[in-house]
């Protein structure tokens, strides 16, 4: 009895390579005009052995399998521990840890010292802007004179404020009264 699900016609094509996909019900057929994939129900392995070849293994499982395969290649006699080192206490552990920490700190400091300034985007890293920023950090005589001039102006303003608040040059300051805002200003002297 012939099963119709296992018959596939390739009219005008000559089949050259036939391979099953591992663990699946797919048969790949390479022929003279390209490639065809045929479904063959029941052809795949429904219960695969995950210890032999696991198609769904993760990266860590693959690494572990490689290590086990390498260890199985080595003769058991070559895998031994030094009996003089077993049971001994490593008294230099603290010194070794301090050396490692010092080396790491030196490496991090070296990396930070050699790190280039990150260039930001959106027009802020244009050459003209970087040059202007460098120029702005330079303190020159012109800038110092302008700073002194602004400080002198600020001092003059503060003196004017104190004189105005005290009501003149020698008069004692008048206490603040919130109702003073409703008093009419004095009339100007006829002149």
Image: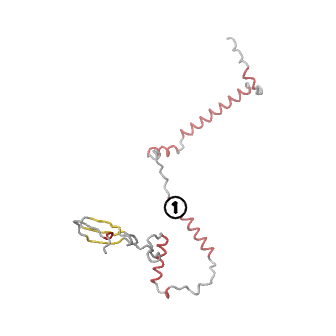
Q: Position of residue 15 (x, y in %)?
A: 25, 70
Q: Which residue is mark 1?
A: 111
Q: Position of residue 7 (x, y in %)?
A: 30, 70
- Callout 1: helix, strand or loop? helix
In the figure, is residue 24 to the left or right of 33? right
Q: Residue at x 60, y 35 (%)?
A: 150
Q: Residue furthest front?
A: 1
**Quadrant location, the N terminus:** bottom left
Which one is nearer the viewer's eye here, 74 or 157? 74
Which one is nearer the viewer's eye here, 60 or 9? 9
Q: Quadrant of residue 156?
A: top right
Q: Residue at x 73, y 21 (%)?
A: 182
Q: Residue furthest top?
A: 190
Q: Residue at x 47, y 73 (%)?
A: 63
In the figure, is residue 45 to the left or right of 38? right
Q: Residue at x 69, y 29 (%)?
A: 161
Q: How many marks?
A: 1
Q: Neighbour class for label 1 at 10 Å: few (<14), some, many (≥20)?
A: few
Which one is nearer the viewer's eye here, 62 or 19? 19
């Amino acid at each position: 009895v012939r099963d119709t699900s296992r018959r596939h016609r390739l009219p005008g094509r000559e089949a050259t390579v036939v391979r099953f996909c591992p663990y699946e019900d797919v048969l790949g057929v390479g022929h003279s005009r390209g490639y065809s994939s045929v479904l063959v129900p029941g052809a795949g392995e429904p219960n695969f052995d995950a210890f032999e070849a696991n198609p769904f293994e993760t990266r860590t499982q693959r690494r572990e399998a490689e290590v086990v395969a390498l260890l199985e290649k080595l003769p058991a006699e070559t895998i031994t521990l030094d009996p003089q080192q077993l049971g001994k206490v490593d008294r230099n552990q603290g010194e070794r840890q301090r050396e490692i920490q010092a080396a790491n700190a030196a490496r991090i400091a070296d990396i930070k010292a050699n790190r280039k300034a990150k260039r930001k985007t959106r027009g802020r890293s244009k050459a003209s802007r970087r040059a202007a920023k460098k120029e702005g950090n330079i303190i020159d005589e012109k800038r110092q004179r302008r700073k002194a001039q602004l400080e002198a102006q600020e001092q003059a303003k503060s003196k004017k404020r104190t004189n105005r608040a005290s009501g003149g040059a020698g008069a004692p300051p008048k206490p603040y009264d919130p109702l003073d805002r409703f008093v009419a200003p004095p009339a100007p002297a006829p002149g």
